[in-house]
Amino acid sequence: MPTAPTEYDPTLGKKFIFVTGGVMSGLGKGITAASTGRLLANAGFDVTAVKIDPYLNVDAGTMNPFQHGEVYVLRDGAEVDLDLGNYERFLDIDMTADHNVTTGKVYQHVIEKERSGDYLGKTVQIIPHVTDDIKRRIREAAAGHDVCIVEVGGTVGDIEGMPFLEALRQFVHEQESDDFLLMHVTLVPYSKNGEQKTKPTQHSVKELRSIGLQPDVLIGRCETPLADDVKRKIALFCDVPTDAVFSNPDVEDIYHVPLTVEEEGLDQYVMEELGLAERALPREDRATGWRDLVTRERTGELDVALVGKYALEDAYLSVHEALKHAGLEHGVDVNVLWVDADEMDADHRARLEAADAIIVPGGFGVRGTEGKIDAIRYARERGVPFLGLCLGFQLAVVEFARNVADLDGAHSTELYENASTPVIDLLPEQYEIEEMGGTMRLGAYETDVSPGTLAADLYGDSCVERHRHRYEVNPEYIDDLEDAGLVFSGRVNNRMEILELPDHPFFFGTQFHPEFRSRPGRASPPFLGLLAAALDREPAETEGVSA
């Protein structure tokens, strides 16, 4: 039976910023929204965020990373869109499932209420039942915070997003004028003759206005800052003040976007429109840690091989970002060398051999696993600093079992169901589970760390990290593995969470995903340790090798 319904309360929440996108997807709405939130937080406000995903999936857990990017895991185990990872990193907050609203979630809840008789006698419709549920979710996530930034995924005009845009239209009428701001992000491309073209923005705003929404702020995504005459033209045709049109040009690093839009004056304009300017900290008192960190001088660089099967940065976004955070703290640039575990041809082998460190990240499925095992063996035998994450941790166990512990036929039953030596096996609580969505071991768990180990140097007595897996080290083989020299330095009862090799410069694996809790200024301990070991190592030969 569904839980008791929560009545829609239009008084919940204080100030709202809605962020929509036009022309095309993938413009960077999430980074623009997160950057705005970062600046408001610097000014002393308590900021939270909500990501709306108009797909029919209840969550992102069953989506292909190649099509949709990585599945990001929150502390409560929610499997969500990667944009929530950006919000956590930029705002330095922990979010929950309530901060991700999907069409599947909304419709599932409304249908459950209908089946239980909550709407008895009524015709259940998009308006008001679905739109009320959308507004309820946004307001409940916003409750208790000064500002809630709501990013609407997709592009204005997409049929999937129409109920959400209708909910926004209703929102406008429920709020005081200075409690609601609609920010619209559009593409301003160059023509072949080098002219910045405003027509896509005009059509996008026309589409938005056709459903009753007038943007308050326009953000032009562009290669270079918008020319003044282009801003004036956009303002004229889109019916906004010229000072409400802002540039968001391409930058070298996404962490520079807050600096760029701050220089444009976006934060000050937003605060004035929301009636927050007088409550903001004086500019000289605002937090500058973000600017100081992301503009810190780098004194060197490292090449890290990322061994995976999806040749797409978004599929391993949090790993890329965690490396960046660790690099900031060590004062080095980190170049990620993509190594295709499925092919491991001459070019990819050269990248592996040129790397200062090697990471095997998480993943699912058999494709590419033997290439990953080969990379792990290379790192173990050559003394290359190595970090294995989730599946990378499990494959490190398989590699060690095969090549050091002499456990013939060692494998994972996830990858080879009939393995004669199943050193990795299904979690006991997974035996009876048939549904795929939201049924793994998910979310934050505390791990006890053994004293006197590398894990203790990195974490101390314990750590709390996020998980996403169905399989684990088979307890039947732990004694054999440890007798052969593998150390399980982090455990939850009889569950192995961390492994290491004491006689190796840095050979470290985690069943959990430490990358999900890494932040600028608060880098993940395993990533810090990996780069520290790489810096202590003799530089690898990198001539002629590229990412």
Image: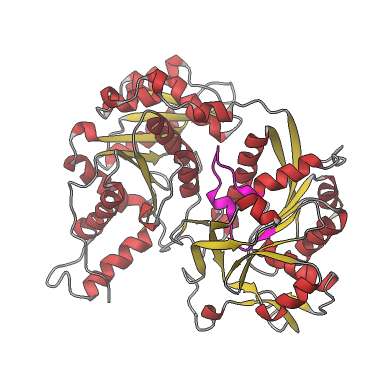
Quarter of the image with the N terminus is bottom left
Q: Quadrant of residue 115?
A: bottom left
459 displayed left or right of 95: right
Residue 177 can be seen in this image: yes
Taking depth in this image into account, of 342 and 442 the one nearest to the observer is: 442
| Residue extent of the magenta highlight | 509-526
Identified at 81% across, 78% down, the residue is: 407
Q: Position of residue 162 (x, y in %)?
A: 32, 51
Quarter of the image with the C terminus is top right
Residue 197 can be seen in this image: no
Q: Is residue 511 magenta?
A: yes
Q: Position of residue 462 (x, y in %)?
A: 56, 58
Determine whether 80 is above or below 474 in the image: above
Report the residue that reaches farthest toward the left.
121
Identified at 21% across, 65% down, the residue is: 5
Identified at 43% across, 34% down, the residue is: 38
Taking depth in this image into account, of 193 and 382 the one nearest to the observer is: 382
486 displayed left or right of 167: right
Q: Position of residue 181 (x, y in %)?
A: 29, 34
Determine whether 94 is above or below 29 in the image: below
Report the residue that reaches farthest toward the front.
452
Taking depth in this image into account, of 374 and 180 the one nearest to the observer is: 374
Q: Position of residue 31 (x, y in %)?
A: 48, 38
